[in-house]
Image (cartoon, helix red, strand yellow):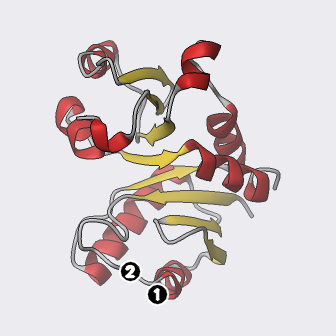
Amino acid sequence: MPRYIAFLRAINVGGHTVKMDRLRELFSSMGHTNVETFIASGNVVFDSPGKAAALERTIEATLEDALGYEVATFIRTPGELVVAAERQPFPVRPFEEAVAFNVGFLRDPLDPTGQRKLMTLRTDIDDFRVQGREIYWLCRKRQSESTFSNAVLERALGCRATIRGAKTLKKMADKYGRD
């Protein structure tokens, strides 16, 4: 049975608190098996016979019904997780000097217009690269000094997204990416 990783938006941020045992119960109630959560920020690993696009819609609807708010869901396979975690699309020196490196997940790849909109958000602090359905965000200072955020990204692009730290993704890839 295929294994998937769901990256959920709005879990344990912005006043939305969800205990991980509750999240695992909700995923199990949808018929998913071998459900695990990875840190308390909306990363769920599970097995399911379904296809990713259908799973995203079903998970979103179920979580909204159960939790009372929208939970955008972004599904990746273990192989896609490994690729996202290992990719480093910036020149070596700026990357090594950066304070933070993050990956944003999208449902669909950005078209050229979306990519241009994203690049208008570049500053002396923030830089971006796009690869497929992922946005790579290099932050040269502390993120608290940046004007960029998930909400800014969504407003600029007109679509839902969720962001994870690259260190978290590497840990997840080491644990789940070789399945």
In this view of the protein, can residue 149 be seen by the observer?
A: no
What percent of the width, then of the height, locates residue 169?
62, 48
In this view of the protein, can residue 24 be seen by the observer?
A: yes
What residue lies at 61% left-to-right and 24% top-to-bottom? Answer: 96
Specify the amino acid type for callout 1: Arg
Position of residue 93 in the picture relative to residue 7 (left or right): right
Position of residue 2 in the picture relative to residue 137 (left or right): right
Position of residue 121 in the picture relative to residue 92 (left or right): left
Toward which corner of the image does residue 91 lie, by quadrant?
A: top right
What residue lies at 56% left-to-right and 67% top-to-bottom? Answer: 44
Judge whether 37 appears above or below 96 on screen: below
What percent of the width, then of the height, locates residue 30?
50, 79
What percent of the width, then of the height, locates residue 121?
25, 22
Specify the amino acid type for callout 2: Val
Quick one: label 1, few (<14), some, or many (20+) residues within 10 Å?
A: few
**Quadrant of the rendering where the C terminus is positioned:** bottom right
- State the residue in front, 113 or 62: 113
What residue lies at 70% left-to-right and 54% top-to-bottom? Answer: 171
Q: Mark number for residue 22?
A: 1
- State the residue in front, 158 or 104: 104
Residue at mark 2: 18
